[in-house]
Amino acid sequence: MCKNCKGNYYITTPIYYPSSNLHIGHAYCTVATDAMARYKRLQGYNVKFLTGTDEHGQKIEDKAKEAGVTPQQFVDKIVLGEKGVLDLWKLMNISYDRFIRTTDDYHVEAIAKIFRKMYEKGDIYKGSYKGKYCKPCESFWTESQLVEGKCPDCGRDVEDAEEEAYFFRLGKYADRIRDLLENTDFLEPRSRVNEMVNNFIKPGLEDLCVSRTSFTWGVPVDFDPGHVVYVWIDALNNYITALGYENEKYDDFDAFWPADVHFVGKEIVRFHAIIWPAILMSLELPLPKKVYGHGWLNFNGEKMSKSRGNVVDPYLLSERFGVDALRFFLLRTFPFGSDGNFTNELLINTINMDLANVLGNLVSRTTAMAQKYFEGKLVSGGEAAELDGELRALAAEVIANYEKQMDAFQFSVGLNEAFKLINRANKYIDETAPWVLAKSEETKPRLLTVLKNLCECIRVAAILVSPVMPDSAKAILDQLNVPEEGRTWEALHYCDDPESWWTTSAAAPLFPRIDMEKELAALEELKAQAAKAALPALEVEPYTDEKVDFETFCKNDLRAVKVLECVPVKKSDKLLQFTLDDGSGTNRQILSGIAKFYKPEELVGKTLVAITNLPPRKMMGRESCGMLLSAIHTEKGEEKLNLIMISDSIPAGAKLC
Ligand code: MSP
C-alpha cells in the first residue's frame, strides 16, 4: 500500500464485446467508473481501475468470417484501430490503470487453470446440453425463461441446441448466494435484489453450461480438446486474472482483491450477482464488496441498437460539445441506478443551463471583475459581512452531502450539491452588487472580500466537480492560480479569510452557449450523412427470373450511334435532346432523361448504343425515336448512371448483337 494513503481501492467496468464500435451507453458506465476512480484518488486512495474487452465467442467468430478476416484481426481492429475502444477511452479521458483483453496470453492461460481447478474440485462436470440458445447474446435459456418464445434479453429468435458440454454446479451455492443477496448490501440498488431472488433463485438455480463445442474462438479446455470455455467463466474471471490470479503477469491480487465495486449494466447483474459469487465460492476466494447495477440509456425513448440505427456516437458528441460537457451531462442528468432517456435537446439544454449559464458565468463574471477592479490581484485584508457566513455554512453542508452521495454512487445528486454552492455564489453576486461597491474607495475593502469569497466558492466547487470534469476543473483552478495544495481533498473546506494568493485572469468562455436550433439541425445532417455512409457501398438492381426467348431478344435493333449535337430541353431539368448519326443518312433524334448525370457538351462526338426500333414517343412536345442504353446502379444510397460508350472506331449504324 502507498505511504500516507487511505488504502487500496479496486473498481471495474464490464469488459466490452468488441463486436461493433462502442456507443454512448457503453461510455456511460465507463465515465461513471472513471469519475468514481478519480473521486477515490482525490480522497487519497490507491486506486486500481480496470476495464477491457471480452473478445471470445461465437458472435465474434461469425462476424470475423463475414468480414473475411481472422477473429483476432477482427477484434484488434475494433480495440486498437482508429476510433476504436482505446482511442475512445483516450478521447474521453478515461483514467484506467489496467486494460485487459480476454485474448491476452496471461488471461487465456489463467482461465484454463481456473477451469481445471473447478473441474478437479467436482464443481464442473460433463453432461449434455439441451436448450434454447440466443446467438447474438451468447446465452442459453430454458423454455420457461423465454418471453413469448424469444430471448428475454434482446427479444430475438432463439434456436434449439443440444451438445456435449461441461456444467458448473451453480445450484450447490444457491443458499449462500440467496443469503448474500438478501442479508448483505452486496448488490445495489436494492431493487435489483428482488428481481434476482424472484426470477432466478426461487425457481431453482439450474447448473450452468460452461463449455461449447460448436465454435473454436475461445479458451480451449486443456484436458478435453474440442471444448472451449464458454463465455461467462472466461469473462467474469477477468476481474482476478488482471490482478495476477493464476498467472505471472501481475502481482496485485493480495493487495486489491476483493474488489470494492463492480459497476455493471442492469442486464448483466444476474451474471455478476449470482454466477460470479458462485465461481468465487468454488475457487474459495473472497467475494467482491459490491456489485452496482446501473440503468440503461435509451435514445428518444427507444432502446439503442445498431439495427434500429439509433445508436448515439460518443466520439461525435465529444468532438462537438467537449468531453467534459458530455461526461457532466451523463452523470448529472441520469440517476445512476435508473434508466435514462438520452435526447440531443436534453444534452444541449444541460450544457447551456448548468455549464454555460451557471458555472461558466460564475467563473467568467468573477474573474472579469477581479481583473477590472484589482487587476487580478486579490490581496489580503478586506471587510467581511454577515452574509459571507451563509456561503461558508452552505459550503460545509454541500461538501458533507457530496461525499455521502458520491460514496453511494449517486453522481447526479453529488453534482447537484456542488451546484447548490455555485447557484448560491451567483446569487451572492446579485446581493452584493460588486459594481456598486466598486464606485467608491470606501467600499473597496468590502469589494475585495466579496471577490475573494466568490473565488473560494469557485475553488471548492471546482474540486467537487473535478472527478466528473477533470479538464474543466483544472482550467478553472488555473484561472484562479490555485496552488497544488489548494486543489486537494484536505483543502476541501471553505477558507474563512482567503489568503492573498488569488490572482485571477480572464480566459475564453469555458462552456460556450450552443444555439439549440442550429445544433439540432447540424446533428440531424450528420446523422443523415452517417446513415448514408453506412449503406451498402454498391447496390445493383436485383436480377429477374423472367426469361426472354432468343427470337424476341433479337428483335431489339441495337445500333452504334454518334452524337452530333446534344442540348438541354427547355423547362425540363431531366431531359437532354440528342441529334445522332445512325448511319442511315438521316439524323435521328432521341430524348433521354439523363441531364443530372452529364453536361451536354461532354457527350458530343461520343459513340453510344441506341435501341432504334421502339415506337416514337413524344416528350415535352418533341419526338424521341429510340432509347440510349446506359448502366445504372446505387452507390451509398445515390443513383448513378453511365451511358454505354463504345469504341469510336465502330462506325455509326453498326448493328450490335
Ligand atoms: N462482455 C459483457 C460483460 C462482461 S463483464 C465480465 C457485456 N459486454 S457489452 O459490451 O455488451 O456491454 C458492456 C456494458 O455496457 C454492460 O454493462 C451493458 O449494460 C452496458 N450497456 C450497453 N448498452 C447500454 C445502454 N444503452 N445504456 C447503458 N449501458 C449499456 O455485457
Image (cartoon, grey):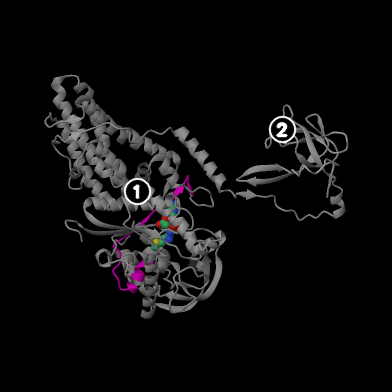
In terms of depth relative to the viewer, which is nearer, 78 or 428? 78
Which residue sits furthest left?
381
Q: Is residue 479 left or right of residue 585?
A: left
Amino acid residing under circle 1? Asn
Quadrant observed for ligand 1 in the rendered image: bottom left
Residue 82 x, y percent position in the rendering: 45, 51
* Residue that label 1 marks: 93
Which residue is depicted at the point 38% across and 65% down? 236
Tell me, yes or no, whether the highlighted magenta stretch contains residue 353. no
Q: Of tags 1 and 2, which is closer to the observer?
A: 2
In terms of depth relative to the viewer, which is nearer, 47 or 330? 47
The answer to whether residue 152 is seen in the rendering is no
Q: Looking at the picture, does residue 318 appear above or below residue 156?
A: above
How far is the residue under mark 1 from the one under mark 2? 55 Å
Which residue is depicted at the point 31% across and 70% down? 248
- The quarter in which the N terminus is drawn is bottom left
Q: Given contact means CB atoms under 8 Å apart, are the residues at marks 1 and 2 in contact?
A: no
The answer to whether residue 102 is seen in the rendering is yes
Residue 648 x, y percent position in the rendering: 77, 42
Tell me, yes or no, whether the highlighted magenta stretch contains residue 298. yes
Mark 2 surroundings within 10 Å by alpha-carbon count, few (fewer than 14), some (14 through 19), many (20 or more)? some
- Disc 2, SS: helix
Mark 1 surroundings within 10 Å by alpha-carbon count, few (fewer than 14), some (14 through 19), many (20 or more)? some
* Residue that label 2 marks: 600
Residue 257 x, y percent position in the rendering: 28, 65
Region of the chain picked out in magenta, as a range: 273-302
Which residue is depicted at the point 21% across and 37% down? 481
Query: In the rendered structure, which disc, 1 or 2, sits on the residue that comes first in sequence?
Result: 1
